[in-house]
Image: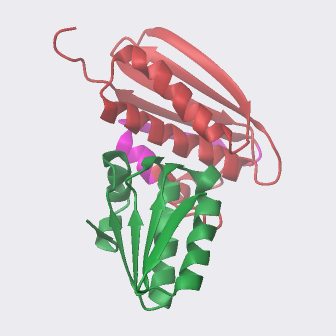
């Protein structure tokens, strides 16, 4: 699969950057001429992935988060959110609905939302090394373009 | 002001506006807790007409308010949910527990 365009953003795990990350993703995705619903799906999934990195990867420190966005030649958007935080020992458990290690501000539905809003969700993680979340979403080609 | 509340005859309306993510969830939860504690409402209406975005943080906010209303033996409903937020709440199955209008 050929990559037609890509960007990489690096930012510290401050919660103020959640809004920045999802807005940046929405702006980049605009090249695919998405519908409002498609843009909102991308924003929601990015918000979940970045929030996970901020809350869970670096619970007591500020750490580095890198978000890569790629436009692929099948008219899809690939989003990769990577951290170098504490990692996840059991990825299947973390992906289960309602499971959370966070406090009551977290619902445990982050991965469920990412799964239902994206076409592909892959999570690679190793304790002590960090986590990489890769998501892909096809953007429908609209008539007349 | 994270939440704008009005109360009449122990009916509390809470308007949550702007973007509701993890960055803002705590202050919204605390504001709702405080208003429920003061008003002890028999009905809470959460008005999302001014909500421009939410993620799963909005689920946690609603579940907490719903539990709190159960403790004070009141009911809760959510009105004017925008389509983006509605999709998030549906993905979580929230409509099975909370009354949306």
Q: How many marks?
A: 0
Q: Where residue A120 appears, x then y in whole percent? A: 40, 36
Query: Compared to A88, does A66 lie above or below?
Result: above
Q: Quadrant of the N terminus of chain A?
A: top left
Judge whether residue A89 is colored magenta: no
- Residue A104 point in image, percent of width and height: 61, 69
Horizontal placement of A1 versus A94: left or right?
Answer: left
- The quadrant holding residue A143 is top left
Image position of B28 with respect to B44: above or below: above
> Can you say whether B64 is above or below A38 in the image?
below
Residue A87 seen by the camera: no
Q: Residue at x 53, y 34 (%)?
A: A22
* Residue occupying the far front of the picture: B8
Give B84 or A9, whichever is nearer the viewer. Answer: B84
Inspect this view and state whether residue A31 appears: yes
> How is colour applied across the structure in the image?
by chain
Q: Nearer the viewer, residue B94 or A91?
A: B94
Residue A99's spot in the image, x, y percent?
53, 64
The image quarter containing residue A67 is: top right
Q: Which chain is red?
A: A
Look at the image and give the colour of chain B. green
Verify whether residue A122 appears in magenta.
yes
Of A53 and A90, nearer the camera is A53
Residue A130 image position (x, y, % from top left): 71, 41
Q: Quadrant of the C terminus of chain A?
A: top left
Hey, which residue is sitting farthest left in the picture?
A143
Magenta range is A112-128
User: Which residue is painted at 43% across and 34% down in the image?
Assistant: A42
């Amino acid at each position: 699969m050929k990559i037609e365009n890509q960007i990489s953003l690096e930012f510290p795990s401050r919660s103020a950057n959640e809004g920045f990350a999802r807005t940046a993703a929405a702006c980049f995705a605009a090249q695919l001429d998405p519908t409002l619903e498609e843009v909102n799906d991308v924003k929601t999934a990015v918000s979940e992935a970045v929030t996970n990195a901020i809350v869970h990867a670096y619970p007591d420190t500020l750490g580095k988060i890198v978000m890569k966005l790629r436009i692929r030649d099948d008219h899809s958007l690939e989003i990769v959110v990577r951290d170098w935080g504490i990692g996840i020992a059991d990825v299947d458990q973390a992906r289960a609905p309602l499971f959370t290690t966070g406090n009551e501000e977290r619902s445990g539905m982050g991965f469920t939302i990412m799964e239902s809003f994206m076409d592909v969700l892959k999570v690679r993680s190793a304790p002590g090394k960090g986590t990489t979340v890769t998501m892909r979403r096809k953007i429908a080609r609209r008539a007349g373009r | 002001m994270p939440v704008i509340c009005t109360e009449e005859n122990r009916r509390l309306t809470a308007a949550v506006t702007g973007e509701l993510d993890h960055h803002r969830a705590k202050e919204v939860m605390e504001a709702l807790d405080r208003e429920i504690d003061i008003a002890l409402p028999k009905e809470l209406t959460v008005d999302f007409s001014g909500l421009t975005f939410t993620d799963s943080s909005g689920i946690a906010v609603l579940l907490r308010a719903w539990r709190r209303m159960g403790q004070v033996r009141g009911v809760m409903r959510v009105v004017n949910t925008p389509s983006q937020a509605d999709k998030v709440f549906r993905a979580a199955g929230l409509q099975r527990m909370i009354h949306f209008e």
